[in-house]
Amino acid sequence: MDRDKTKTCCFTGHRPDKLPWREREGDPRCVQLKQSIFQAVEAVYEAGVRHFISGMARGCDLYCAEAVLELRRERRDITLECARPCETQADSWPAAERARYQTILNQCNFETLVQHHYDRFCMMRRNRYMVDRSGWVIAVYNGVPRGGTFQTLQYAMKRGLETRMLDLEDFC
């Protein structure tokens, strides 16, 4: 599947344990973040992006995938790719999150399995897969210089991706 990188956007962002509201998605700050994610997806769509890649982690990755699916209801030329790091990605998640994950997978246009079995590098490989195929990244970032979101954002900037940053501090 060769795609024009300038028309592809990936996502990076934090899992619930690093979000101020944790798993309480009804929190007004989370609602505001989700609106901002949707607006960022819409803005890169207006800039020509048609293909979006989500790494499907809990938290911001799922928020982003859901924003793409929401916009796709209005803009039929959008595609969503779910890049899974390994087959067991969601196996230990709470039941409701596994169901949400499966609902997104059932609606995506493409599903990519980066590798079959979990190892300590599979998340990094998934993140590099997404960045290497994208010209854009939308990042939800708390400013802490460590962790997977930081590493993915650094790699994306090194690769020259157009960056839309949503500073988590703006939602606190």
Image: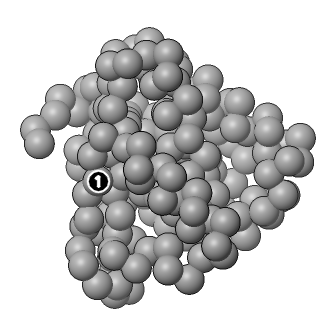
Residue occupied by mark 1 = 111
Q: How many marks?
A: 1
Answer left or right for 16 relative to 122: right
Hey, which quadrant is residue 98 in on the image?
bottom right
x, y percent for residue 85: 34, 69
Answer left or right for 169 relative to 114: right
Helix, strand or loop under label 1: strand
Q: Is residue 156 visible?
A: no
x, y percent for residue 8: 30, 33
**What kind of residue is marked 1?**
Glu
Identify the residue at horizontal 51%, vertical 52% (top origin).
103
x, y percent for residue 126: 32, 64
Identify the residue at horizontal 71%, vertical 30% (top origin).
35
Q: Is residue 106 visible?
A: yes
Where the N terminus falls, by quadrant? Answer: top left
Identify the residue at horizontal 61%, vertical 29% (top origin).
38
